[in-house]
Every structure is written in structure tokens, then in C-alpha cells.
Amino acid sequence: MEKAPAAPHPDYDLLRPIENPGKSFYYIVAVLLVIILYTGYVYIRQVYYGLGVTGMAQPVTWGFYIINFVFFIGISHAGTLISAILRLSKAEWRRPITRMAEVITAIVLAIGGLHPILDLGRPDRMTHLFYNGRLQSPLLWDIVSITAYFTASTVYLYIPMIPDIAILRDRGVKPRWLYEFLSWGWQGTEQQHKVLDRAMNILMVVVIPIAVSVHTIISYIFAMTVQPGWHSTIFGPYFVVGAIFSGIAAILVLMIVFRKIFHLERYLKLIHFNYLSVLLLVMSLLWFYFTFSEYLTGYYGHEPNEMRVFWYKFSGAFAPYFWTMVTCNFLLPLILLSNRKTRTIPGILIASISVIIGMWLERLIIVVPSLANPRLSYPTGIYIPSHTEWMLFLGGVSVFILGYMMFARFFPVISVWEIQEGRQESAKTVTERITSYMPDPEPPLAKG
Amino acid sequence: MKWGMVIDLQKCTGCGECVAACKLENNVAIVEPKESEMGRTMLWMDMLTVYEGEYPRLRVRQFPRPCMHCDHPPCTKVCPVRATYKNEEGIVTQIYPQCIGCRYCMAACPYTVKSFNWYKPEWAPGIRETANPDVSVRPVGVVEKCTFCVHRLQKAKEQAKSEGRNLRDGDFQTACAESCPAGAIVFGDLENTSHRVNPLSRSPRATRLLEDLGTEPKVIYLKEVD
């Protein structure tokens, strides 16, 4: 069969990166692979010598691995949760955003979920968790909820991709077997659309409670101990808010990056950034509210051990990190995003990056100070991450970039069919919906 | 049976004999000075120093700190693989081959008594030969802590069984209690009314560390009285 040249497509801009990847793609992949291979070597070295190659000691027995675990899983709330909420609330402006957000979740969750394994002193005994696991331990809850979230969010990413994969299949994009296989015989019939809609509706309702449970349970790892600074009932919602907050920041950064390199200005318009950044601002205020409540309660309770951790953060060794966190998560986004003049693409980019840094610092500030200040009269703990830990962090970020690039190489990062559907139908459905909000016309007077 | 320990701080001189005896008895690894400075010293029995008051009324107190063997241990609650648990005699034990090294128990322990094997433990040539054959040597990557010398209990039980009798008072002593030159550490069955620990644990001077946490430690300190 003769291969027909790719026909012009109204949304060719979205398909171009797949049909004609540039050369720079391969250079970046090569650089990332080198970093990842080196990270692999560093990790194998850690397995060989033991966790002594890290900067962890007593009493700070948890460090970068747990911090990054919480951080990455937090970022993963970007996707599925945001996209499910936007879909569920029928926000029409979601169309170019949902796919990007869901991809973040799938990739970051895989990376974050592996972090506790990096932290194990005996990764060779990991299977003990399955045949000797204690369900009373919050770590087991985590395994359950993260597995559930990963499964649900990858399915939730994949299902709305099927029509797009079929578009690529029909255009004869290589590798054909991949698109042939993944499109599952999608023909775009009415029946198929009905089933797809049904599946998406079920998934987005299911995925929201799972996503909320994931970060709540991560907070439980800390909250279920009696340690000062950790044993707090507010931790569940506090972590969920922080997770969504950092997730939105991550989506915004990625949207700006893809807009620039794939020239998607026609799709990712200022209005999308405007709406999302207002959401980021709202989350920033919520985050501040939770942080304020958490520390004010601690301060007024004035329990001596709690206060030791409190001052360690406010004016002690961790004060620089603490106040940077407050600046990055609250002051900077508040100033940049509440002002229309600075709520521009560069302003949003700065605010989003600052939120990502701030949220990472928040994880650091939650994990280390409580451990560094034991209750009994031990010397205050010191934690200086080693080269190994920094490399594994960098490696994790590289895996994320590589994963995202590979996705964008083979699949459209913006849902083509949903954009098309939006063009054709949303004006009509939205009008219908708005009409349905309107007061009913007066009933005709009964004829008497 | 409920094993417990009474430490009389009036008698304790802070000499550190218990620390040394414990280290030798239990084959606790000696780490390099550089590691030790990082905070990786391994001590099942530690000697803690408390500074009370301010100059010129400064007072320095020292007290030995084994594992508290809590009746409601925060560490066993969080272990994902049951590598630490409270046995029927009240001893909080560690199962080294079961431990996956997540260090959750270390993070959860309010007394910070646990140590981790950051590297494979190594012994200098001379020390290797003096190791206690009754205590297993821990591998890299697992958590360890004071076991109330449970290997000695095991031995005493076997001895009693071979002689066809019940365990008697004094059949079993921990290394720290045995070594204490001031006789400040008394170890025994808290449920046995005839044992010395029993009246001592009810002394008006008796106190437990961080009692308000509800962990119910089985290590009882007798306060100093001036």
C-alpha cells in the first residue's frame, strides 16, 4: 500500500512535534540519558556500601529521599486531580490543559513512588512488605493508595487519548504498530464516543477521592507518630492543599515551556494562564491559611518540645529556609499574581517556579527539624545531604524531563479531539446549559 | 512476667561502665571517628547529660539511657514488616533478618534510642576475637537497639529447663546492671512481688521519662534527692 502524504489537518500544530521531531530532541535525550546512567551508578554504589554514603545519621534519619518522595507525589496532584475537577465542573477552558496535567501525574507518580525504595537500608528485602506487611503501618497504607492512584491516573490519561491515537494511526505516523495497537480499533462512531464519555465520567469521579487520599496518607506517615511538629490533625488537608498548589505551579511551568518550544500560542492563550494563575493564587492563600493555623496553634499550646522545633524553624538553623519558603509560597505569588500588570507569562513563570521551590522547602522543613530536635537531651541533629542524594534528586528530575519528552515525541500533549469537539459543540452546549440556568418562562395562564 | 529496670540516679555516678559493658556484651559496632562526629555512633546504652539552671546555679546531671521497652511502644506501631514488636514478656525486640531498613521506627521513637547500620559493621582485628558468640552480628542497613540482653534470658531459661525448675530471681541480669559498680541499675521481673525491682519501682522517687506521652516505659528512674 502506498503511503499517502500526511493530509493537512486543522490542528497540525499539535501533531507536528510527533510527525517531524527536531534534531535537538535527540541531543537533549542523550544528555538526560547520561545523567540517568550516572544516577543509576550512584544508586548501585549506595546499595553496595549501605546508606552510609548519604548525609543521614542519628537523629536525622530521614533526608532527601523522603523529602523528594513527598515533593514528587505532591506535584503529581497536578494532573489528574486538577483535570478531573475541571472536567467535572465543565470548565470549557480546560480543553488544552487536561492532557498535559495528566501526563505530569503519571510520570511523577512513578518517580515519587519509587523514592521510599531508594530510602530503604535493605532494598533486597522489599518483598517483605508483601508477604509480611503490617496493615497497621502507615507505610502500607501508602503503598495501597499510591498503587491505586497510579493505576487510576494512567487509565484516566490513556482513555481520552484513544481518539487522538486513532488520528495518528489514520495519518500513517510511524511507528504504525504502536498507534495501531493503542487505538483499540477506534473509529469514532457514536457508540464508541458514548462509551468513552461514560468511562471518563466514571474515572474522573473515582480519581478525585483517590488523589485526596494519597496525600492525606503521606501526611499520616508523619502525623501518626507523636513527634513534635508532626503529630497534627491538620496535616492531612494541609498536605493535600500543598500538593495541589505545587501541582498547579508545575502545570503552569510546563504549559509555558511547551507553548514556547512547540509554538502553541494559538492553543494556550493568555486566558488559560490567567485562569490557572488565579487558581494558583487562591491555593497560595489557602496554603498560607493552613501554615498560619498550624504554627499559631503550636505556638499557643507552648509545649516545650513543640516550641523547640518551632524556634528552630522561625529563628534557628532552619530560619533561612523557613522564611524563603514563606516568600516563595506566599509573598511572591501574592504580589505577582494579584496584580494584573505582573500577571503576564513571565510573571506567572516566576511565580510558578518560586512555588515549586517553596513547596520543596516546605517538605524539607517538615521532615528535618522535627527529627533534628529530639525530646531527650541529645545534641541537635545536623543534616547535610551528600553527593549521592543530590545526584538521585537530579536523576529523578531528569527521568521526569525524559519521560515527558518521550511522551511528547509520540503523543500530542494537547488533546486534539477534545479541541475539535470544543470547536464544534461547546458553544452550543454552553448556550444550552446557560439557558437551563435561566428562570423558566411564566406558565401559560390556565384557560378558565 | 514483665521485665523491667530501675535506675537509681542517687547512686549513679555517671561513670559510663554500663555503656561500655553493653557495647561489648551486644557486639555493638564501633564506627570511625569521622562517622561518629556525623552522629552515627552506635550505643544501645547511652549516657545523657542534662544541664539544669543557669550559672552560677548550673547543675549537670547525667543519666544512663537504655531502650525504655515501652508497654505501648510507638516504634512497633509503625513498623511495616513487624521487624520490631513487643514480646509476651514485655521486651521490645528487633528481628534483624526481617527489617527492611526504612527507619520509620527510629523516626517514631520519642526517646531516640535506635541505631542504624549505615555501613557494614567492621571490627578491628583484636576486637573481633572478643565478640560475644551469643549475640548475632547485625548486617548493614538494619535498625538495632537495646534488647534487655534477651540472649541472656534465653540462656537462663534453657539452664532452668535443663535443671527442671522455674526461672529464679537473679538467674538473669542485663550486662549494664551486672557491671554497674555503684549498684544503681537493678533489673528484674516487675510482676514478681518478691523481687527487688518491685518495691523500688513503687518508690516515691520513681519516675519515667516522658511519662505524659503514655508510652508506659518499663525503665524506671529513681530521682536524685538533694
Image (cartoon, helix red, strand yellow):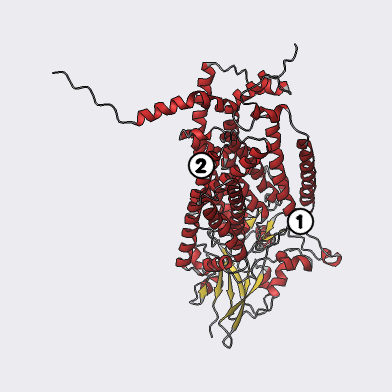
Which residue is at the far top? Answer: A1
What crowding class fits label 1: few (fewer than 14 Cα within 10 Å), some (14-19), or many (20 or more)?
few
Asked if marks 1 and 2 touch (Cβ < 8 Å), the reply is no
Residue in the image at 49% along x and 73% along y: B202
Q: Quadrant of residue A55?
A: bottom right
Residue B148 percent coordinates (x, y): 64, 64
Above or below residue B124? Residue A218 is: above
Q: Nearer the viewer, residue A56 or B84?
A: A56
Q: Is residue A203 visible?
A: yes
Dot 1 or dot 2, earlier in sequence: 2
Q: Nearer the viewer, residue B48 or A408?
A: A408
Above or below residue B65? Residue A9 is: above
Which residue is at the far right? Answer: B125
Which residue is at the far front? Answer: A341
Find residue A275 and name its label.
2
Q: Is residue A25 left or right of residue A321?
A: right
- Count of all numbered marks drawn on residues in the image: 2
Chain under callout 2: A
Kind of residue indicated by mark 1: His
Q: CA distance from mark 1 to mark 2?
A: 40 Å
Q: Quadrant of residue A318?
A: bottom right
Find residue A387 and name its label.
1
Residue in the image at 77% along x and 57% along y: B119
Residue B95 percent coordinates (x, y): 67, 53
Q: Is residue A81 visible?
A: no
Dot 2 falls on a residue whose secondary structure is helix
Above or below residue B34? Residue A389 is: above
Kind of residue indicated by mark 2: Tyr
